[in-house]
Image (spheres, grey):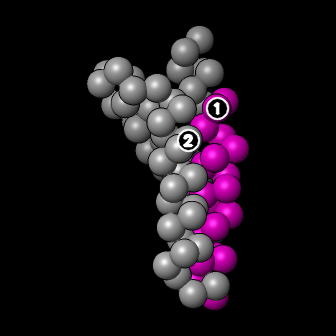
């Protein structure tokens, strides 16, 4: 679990802003997060992938709201 979840939020905001300056939308970031979730499951043993999966699940769920706030 993240000790400082605000650091992860700041990182996601940075990613969204960096992508936006390059003309890339939040939908790409969502696809990227999903690709990482698939890669975790495909490459790591279950005992190693499962502790990390909730973080990627949270990012996937939070990304649309962050993008909306940045667009607002």
Q: Quadrant of the C terminus?
A: top right
Residue 51 percent across, percent down from the top left: 64, 76
Look at the numbered discs 2 and 1 and tell me whether their residues touch, using CB distance below 8 Å.
yes
Inspect this view and state whether residue 17 appears: no
Q: Is residue 42 magenta?
A: no
For the point 60% across and 21% down, which residue is it?
69
The label shown at residue 30 is 2
Image side of residue 14 versus residue 6, left or right: left
Q: Is residue 51 magenta?
A: yes
Return the residue at label 1: 64
Image side of residue 11 versus residue 68, left or right: left
* Magenta: main secondary structure: helix
Residue 26 percent across, percent down from the top left: 51, 30
For the point 60% across and 58% down, which residue is it?
56
For the point 67% across and 56% down, which residue is it?
57
For the point 35% across and 21% down, which residue is it?
23
Image side of residue 24 versus residue 41, left or right: left
In this rendered view, identify the residue nearer to me: 72 or 34.
34
Which picture quadrant has residue 38? bottom right
Q: Earlier in the sequence, mark 2 or mark 1?
A: 2
In this rendered view, identify the residue nearer to me: 9 or 42.
42
Other residues around mark 2 within 10 Å, as few (<14) / some (14–19) / many (≥20): some
Q: Secondary structure at mark 1?
A: helix
Looking at the image, residue 71 lies above or below residue 39: above
Image label count: 2
Highlighted range, magenta: 47-65
């Amino acid at each position: 679990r993240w000790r400082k979840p605000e650091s992860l939020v700041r990182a996601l905001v940075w990613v969204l802003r960096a992508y936006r300056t390059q003309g890339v939308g939040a939908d790409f970031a969502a696809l990227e997060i999903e690709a990482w979730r698939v890669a975790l499951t495909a490459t790591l043993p279950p005992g190693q992938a499962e502790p990390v999966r909730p973080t990627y699940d949270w990012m996937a769920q939070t990304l649309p709201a962050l993008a909306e706030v940045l667009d607002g």
